[in-house]
Amino acid sequence: MPDRYPRDLLGHGPTPPDAHWPGGARLALSLVLNFEEGGENNVLHGDPASEAFLSEITGAQPWPGQRHWNMESIYEYGARAGFWRLHRMLRDLPVTVYGVATALARAPLQVEAMQGAGWEIASHGLKWVEHKDMDEATERAAIRAALDLHEAVTGAPPRGWYTGRCSMNTVRLAAEEGELAYISDSYADDLPYRVRLGDRSQLILPYTLDANDMRFAIAAGHPDGASWERYLIDSFDCLMEEGGRMMSVGLHCRLAGRPGRAQALRRFLDHVRAQGENVWIATRAQIADHWDRVNPEGDTSGAQSADIVRDALPELSDAAVPTGDMAHELDRDAFMARFGGIFEHSPWVAERAWEQELGPAHHHPAGLHAAMRRAFREGSHEERLGVLKAHPDLAGKLAAAGRLTDDSTAEQASAGLDLLTDAERATFQRRNTEYMDRHGFPFIIAVRDHDKAGILDAMERRRDNDTDTEFAEACAQVERIARLRLEALEW
């Protein structure tokens, strides 16, 4: 297999599935409270250095082998004061806690308060430390230990997982070790989506690093509560206007729990409440359960009926594609069997497309067409001319003899070229001959875009163009025919 590109840069594409939020709400809002205090880097916890991440100390650095008094007290504020301030503000709302297992174990009263409020407690890992340098066995053991400790502390296994400081293996390992309704180690979308991890499918509920109080603790962050409040409201209003979206708000006890920031959060929540039933505030587990009900695995019927691509660019079209044997995962023989005839009698186009750096974004008519179009365009002039010459005359001798490919037969029939009168057939054959004599290749047009009269008019109009112009136009028509053939496939 050639190199394959693993990242999915298409996602839901231009027509996201309909979220069908309960009660006709336009937006699902997820409020997330990160509980990390007591699970951060600390030599007391067996870590090699002190914590340096997400605090009030600008430019903090880890202190190898030492405790950091100021850093520890900043984290302690989150557990001792910030948590309770946010609990009083949010206890009547559905909240998801990202709980670091060792931090939860060191905070029994806070856990009792979370459960008393009916909050969901998802796993935030064993410790609030980096996973990027862990080997797979070490990380798997840490995830397993987090799941076990979480269940021992809360009384139930977590339904969701978020690491935050993850490695390239984290999502897969979490999916393998836990029976998780969702994983949130992603910032890739405004809606849930699924990923395939080996033979399993895992629901991903994207999280946020922008609508997140962590931006108070980084250089490119908010200088004050008002700036954060404005950003949250603008994000909320934009997603409400679009409709059918999900918004996450990330909170930390030691950050949003500070008085000046808590007031900004309170005003944002007032703005949210003013929208009434237009917003559904829910835990992440509730959102995951809802998504699985209304957009189950493998179902594409929930996609919006409006075609955003076609509405915006009428010359293009788009089609929803279910998951299955993805195009970039097919070996050469399977790929050629499926797509080798897309360019008329020219399998070299599909073969060279298969050799490209294909990825998930190519499992789609638009994506695979882009790869095949690129292969065609990178062919020599002689190769592309060969593709043009491989196309049959419209309503010509091959059609009369029933020797067209299935695709060509269906395409010509779509414009009524299989039901011509003798006079019409004679006109087509005469214009085909005139065109061929002038340019050296047959007249080509994407007949599905035209009716019989329009095709005849184009033949008359294009016949007298210079050959370079017609070569470019014929190539463009070949590409259009390929796109329509890809869209007609059962994916």
Image: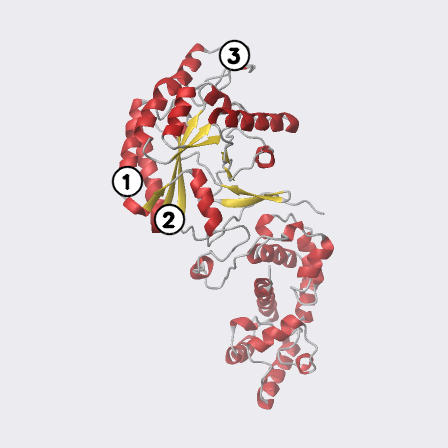
Amino acid of disc 1: Arg
Chain-order first, disc 2 or disc 1: 2
Mark 2 or 1, closer to the camera = 2
In percent of width and height, residue 114 lies at: 39, 28
Q: Position of residue 99 (x, y in %)?
A: 46, 27
Kind of residue indicated by mark 3: Leu
Residue 209 at x, y = what percent? 44, 33
Q: State the separation of the CA atoms marked 2 and 1.
A: 16 Å
Residue behind mark 1 = 273
Type of amino acid under label 2: Pro
Instruction: Answer above or below: position of 378 versus 27.
Output: below
In this rendering, position of residue 354 left or right of residue 240: right
Numbered tag placed on residue 154 in the rendering? none
Give the tally of numbered discs.
3
Rendered residue at 63%/25% (across/down): 138
Residue at horizontal 48 percent and vertical 40 percent from the top: 205
Q: Dot 1 lies on which element?
A: helix
Q: Residues within 10 Å of mark 3 (few under 14, many from 20)?
A: few
Tell me which label, 2 or 3, sits earlier in the chain.
2
Q: Of helix, strand and loop, which one carries label 3? A: helix
* Quarter occupied by residue 413: bottom right
Q: Which mark is residue 44?
A: 3
Find residue 22 and name its label: 2
Q: Name the residue located 45 percent from the left edge and 39 percent from the top edge.
A: 285
| Real-space Cα separation, disc 2 to disc 3, in angstroms | 46 Å
